[in-house]
Amino acid sequence: MMAKQSIKFIVVFLLVLVSFKSFADGGSSHHEKGNVIDTPQEIKDHIKHHLKDSHDFHLFSDNAAGKHYGFSLPVIVWTSKGLKTFMSSAFHHDDAGHVVVDKGDVKLTKIHSKIYELNAGATAVTFDDKHHATNAHKVLDFSITKSVVGMLLAGVLMFLGFVTLAKGYKKGPIPTGIGRLLEPLVIYVRDDIARPNIGEKKYRKFMGFLLTVFFFIWILNLLGLTPLGFNVTGQIAVTACLAIFTVVIYLFSGSKDFWAHTLWMPGVPVILRPVLAVIELVGFLLIKPFSLLVRLFANMTAGHFVVMSLIALTITLKESFGAVGSTGMSLVLALFISVIEVLVAFLQAFIFTMLSSLFIGMAVEEHDHH
Amino acid sequence: MVIPNLVGAGLIVLGGGLGLGQIGGKAMESIARQPEAAGKIQTAMIIIGALLEGLAFGALILGS
Amino acid sequence: MEMLLNDFSPGLFIMQAVILVILIFLMAKFAWRPILNSLSERESGIEDALKAAEKAKIDMENLQANNAKLLQEARTEREEMLKEAREMKTKLVEDAKTEANETAANMIAQAQAAIEGEKKAAIADLKAQVSNLSIDIAEKVIRTELSNKDKQVALVESMLGEATLN
């Protein structure tokens, strides 16, 4: 029953996606000379643009007709004059600060996927020679961006799937349907990630976090491989947030032994203890979360970069191999890397969860006093 | 003299690759020696690999 | 690094934190807790079932051992009973035989005694009759013989000759 509902949900969601509205482009500066992306610089820009978060759900463009297909998403920003909300279509796909949205008391513009508030009195953005805006500053951007949509989608998928599994246990001890796929994964996280690293006695408390994070990252990684073009786990803010959650959890659940060993390591000459304490603190507060967040971010970004570059081979190699040759080559290579990326999607979710539970295990461990 | 970023990146990748090669090679050897411990060795290998990867990526990011 | 910091969006960070907190809470409440509880219930159920099966097996073995023991005991008891019965039978037969023998011997002895008695009585009777008869004969002979003197003497003579025999 629930499985049917979730399938229905996915179908409805896809229908919403397909029934995008098209709207005319106002003043795009990026592709003035060409009608399609064909130069290396344009490909680079396109990839860079994709790797960033975006304020509208862009599916594809017809630059010859000056049309973009997709749908706009709500923009919610906290400006100096309070909360402002409007749809991203107000920017008319401008990403270079040309279109200024006048919201009465504040003027807003979008430069490289970031929303800037123009300083009082200014009507247009001016740039310095390094292309930094001189008369505008960034605002706190709570927009429902593409990444937020991706997170919500992943959350809804997870919720539907696992609530189905949970409800399935009421009918009998063996799950049916989608539960049969999900149950071994839950058992895998519990028995191969949480239990050996945290310990039999304490693992139960952290299962909620570990399971949620594992499936959240995995689903988002896989969503990134779909043509919808999400790059949620390639956003440094997202991975930073995940890493900081882990840090907060292991700092707040650290046992007495953990703090004793971190701050005043026993069995070491007294002179060395403060040095060790500094090293340990830096390790736990900075290096570990930094490596967590950077690993996930860099892996996903690199994966997207490589896949997109290989797809772009169809354009860049056209002159030397002909249309069919370059397309075939790019197809084979992109397929190969995509298969590896499917593995990486799982591996990164696994490693993030694994290292999180390892760190939590270090923090909650109670040593035998020696 | 300023070392260009790309050279730095190359050095990082070189070091990281050497490290990963060591980890992978030794893990393979251990698995060949003790095939029954393959699961544990694999997990340890992945963890160490991940730590190394974090280090290399950290350096790449700091350098970029 | 600079590019990265520039890319970092605090707003997205906050949105992600809010979504993640809500998601962890919802998932823990509606999915993970029931799933993990059902899993551990099922596992402990399986473990209990295995233990119960093991116990049943041991019980069964004990029972079988008991049965064998009982059977053995019953067999020896039966054997003993049979032996006893056999012994009793031979004893009874023996007893009956001796009794019968004794009775027979007694009866024979009594019969012999009776026969002896009868024989003695019959002999006594015969003796009396013979003596009576001989006295009668003697009377008659004497009457006839005493008429003739010579004959009397001859008779006495022969009688005396005969009388020495008895």
Image (cartoon, grey):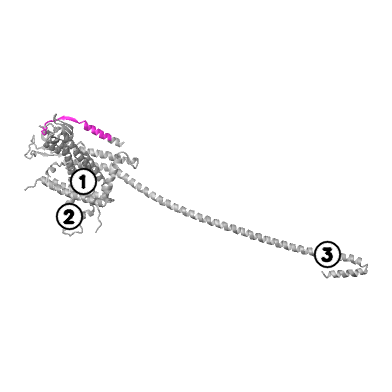
Q: Quadrant for residue C23, please give it.
A: top left
Quadrant where the image shows the C terminus of chain A? bottom left
Please give the residue where the numbered disc 3 appears in the rendered image: C130
Q: Residue C132: say if magenta.
A: no
From the top left corner, tell me how far across and down residue A263 is, in percent.
Answer: 19, 55
Q: Nearer the viewer, residue A314 or A146?
A: A314
**Looking at the image, is mark 1 or mark 3 nearer the viewer?**
3
The answer to whether the residue labelled 2 contacts the one labelled 3, judged by CB atoms less than 8 Å apart, is: no
Q: Are marks 2 and 1 on the same chain?
A: yes
Side of C155 where B8 appears, left or right: left
Magenta highlight range: A7-32
Q: Are marks 2 and 3 on the same chain?
A: no
Side of C104 where A341 appears, left or right: left
Please give the residue where the numbered disc 1 appears in the rendered image: A245
Quadrant where the image shows the N terminus of chain A? top left
Which chain is mark 2 on?
A
Side of A141 where C84 appears, left or right: right
Q: CA distance from mark 2 to mark 3?
A: 160 Å
Counting residues from the start of the chain, the first of labels 2 and 1 encountered is 1
Q: State whether residue A84 appears in this view.
A: no
Amino acid type at mark 3: Val
Please give the residue where the numbered disc 2 appears in the rendered image: A277
From the top left corner, tell me how far across and down residue A214 is, in percent.
Answer: 24, 44
Which chain is mark 1 on?
A
Amino acid type at mark 1: Phe
The answer to whether the residue labelled 1 contacts the one labelled 3, judged by CB atoms less than 8 Å apart, is: no
Which chain is mark 3 on?
C
Q: Quadrant for residue A310, please give it.
A: top left
**Looking at the image, is mark 2 or mark 3 nearer the viewer?**
3
Establish if C95 lies above or below A348: below
The answer to whether the residue labelled 2 contacts the one labelled 1, judged by CB atoms less than 8 Å apart, is: no
